[in-house]
Image: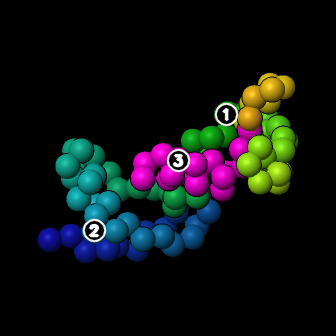
Amino acid sequence: MYEDKTLVCKECGQEFIFTAGEQEFYAEKGFQNEPQRCKACRYARKNAGKPEREMFIATCARCGGEAKVPFQPTEGRAVYCSECFAKMKEEQND
């Protein structure tokens, strides 16, 4: 039915693959045009107007390592690094 296509990004000129699955998705949504930009250029264009998120550094309450978080940590409240946070979520689901 659908086959992968190689397209050229109009932004950076690099070739990218328009997969069969993506083509099927486009057809289901009724999109008429193929993508004009590669994934990296689409992402850059989408986020061009957004300000860079300020990240704060805190100490992980579980492992003591560095935790970068997108909010100002409040004293007395635990902050976890990405790895410990993921492990805690996993443990809750078990």
Disc 3 target residue: 89
x and y percentages locating residue 3 in the rendered image: 25, 74
In percent of the image, x 26 and y 54: which residue is there? 25
- Gap between marks 2 and 1, in whole Å? 31 Å
The mark that comes first in sequence, 1 or 3, is 1
Chief secondary structure of the magenta span? Answer: helix
Span shown in magenta: 79-94
Disc 1 target residue: 49
- Gap between marks 3 and 2, in whole Å? 34 Å
Disc 2 target residue: 20
The mark that comes first in sequence, 2 or 1, is 2
Do we see residue 79 in this rendering?
yes
In percent of the image, x 34 and y 68: which residue is there? 19
The amino acid sitting under disc 1 is: Gly
The amino acid sitting under disc 2 is: Ala
Compare residues 9 and 20 and report the one nearer the observer.
20
Q: Horizontal placement of 13 versus 26: left or right?
A: right
Bin the neighbour count of mark 2 within 10 Å (Cα to Cα): few under 14, some 14-19, many 20 and up. Answer: some
Q: Quadrant of the N terminus?
A: bottom left
Bin the neighbour count of mark 1 within 10 Å (Cα to Cα): few under 14, some 14-19, many 20 and up. Answer: few
Do we see residue 43 in this rendering?
no
x and y percentages locating residue 6 in the rendered image: 40, 74
